[in-house]
């Protein structure tokens, strides 16, 4: 999935490259243009990554302030855009993620393509061994095909069947 946070560093690198070439050429000619291109591209790329770093920092602070119950409620909210981050926060607190597997599996069979995408990100980051077991799953497949591919995982999601992810 390609996001705005993937595009911004590329735009920054391109803008930095252009500004570096123009500024360097004006100051030092061809060698300045080459040096300016390199420096401008690097600084532009770094500048383009800043929004991602800042959003991540705000998200981390927001999640750290929530209780486990609040995190689990957020995960069950259909409007949750970052279930993988919430799951990883629960895991970092030593929580058992087994009760959350059915929620992730429901995302994987959603009629909404975007919801299936965040479900796959959640499965891959919090339950990598299960994601590897359905490596042929594609969020772009029809819903019925997604159901068929995740059915075995739904059986494993029954209490006591899924692996305990504490301490991993």
Image (tube, rainbow, N blue to C red):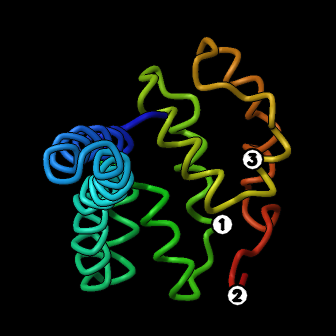
Nearer to us of marks 1 and 2 is 2
Gap in angstroms between the C-alphas marked 2 and 3: 19 Å
Q: Position of residue 21 (x, y in %)?
A: 25, 42
Gap in angstroms between the C-alphas marked 1 and 2: 13 Å
Going from N to C along the chain, the mark reached first, 1 or 3, is 1
Residue at 62% over, 55% down: 101
Q: Tell how many labels.
A: 3
Q: Position of residue 100 (x, y in %)?
A: 56, 60
Q: Is residue 124 shown left or right of residue 46?
A: right
> In terms of image quadrants, where is residue 92?
bottom right
Q: Which mark is residue 167?
A: 2
Question: Residue tagged by mark 1?
Answer: 98
Where 39 sits versus 41, above or below?
below
Residue at 61% over, 59% down: 125
* Secondary element at tag 1: helix
Going from N to C along the chain, the mark reached first, 2 or 3, is 3
Gap in angstroms between the C-alphas marked 1 and 3: 14 Å
Q: Is residue 156 shown left or right of residue 44?
A: right
Question: Residue tagged by mark 3?
Answer: 131
* Secondary element at tag 2: loop
Task: State the residue in front, 131 or 109.
Answer: 131
């Amino acid at each position: 999935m390609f996001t705005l946070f993937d595009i911004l560093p590329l735009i920054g690198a391109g803008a930095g490259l252009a500004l570096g070439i123009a500024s360097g050429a004006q100051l030092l000619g061809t060698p300045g243009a080459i040096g300016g291109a390199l420096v401008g591209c690097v600084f532009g790329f770094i500048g383009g990554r800043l929004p991602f770093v800042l959003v991540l920092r705000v998200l981390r602070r927001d999640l750290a302030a929530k209780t486990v119950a609040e995190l689990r409620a957020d995960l069950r909210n259909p409007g949750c855009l970052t279930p993988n981050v919430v799951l990883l926060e629960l895991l970092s607190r030593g929580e058992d993620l087994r009760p959350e597997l059915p929620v992730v599996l429901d995302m994987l069979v959603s009629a909404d393509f975007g919801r299936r995408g965040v479900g796959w990100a959640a499965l891959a980051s919090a339950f990598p061994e299960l994601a590897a077991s359905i490596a042929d799953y594609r969020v772009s497949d029809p819903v019925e095909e997604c159901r068929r591919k995740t059915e075995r995982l739904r059986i494993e999601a029954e209490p006591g069947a899924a692996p305990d992810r504490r301490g991993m």
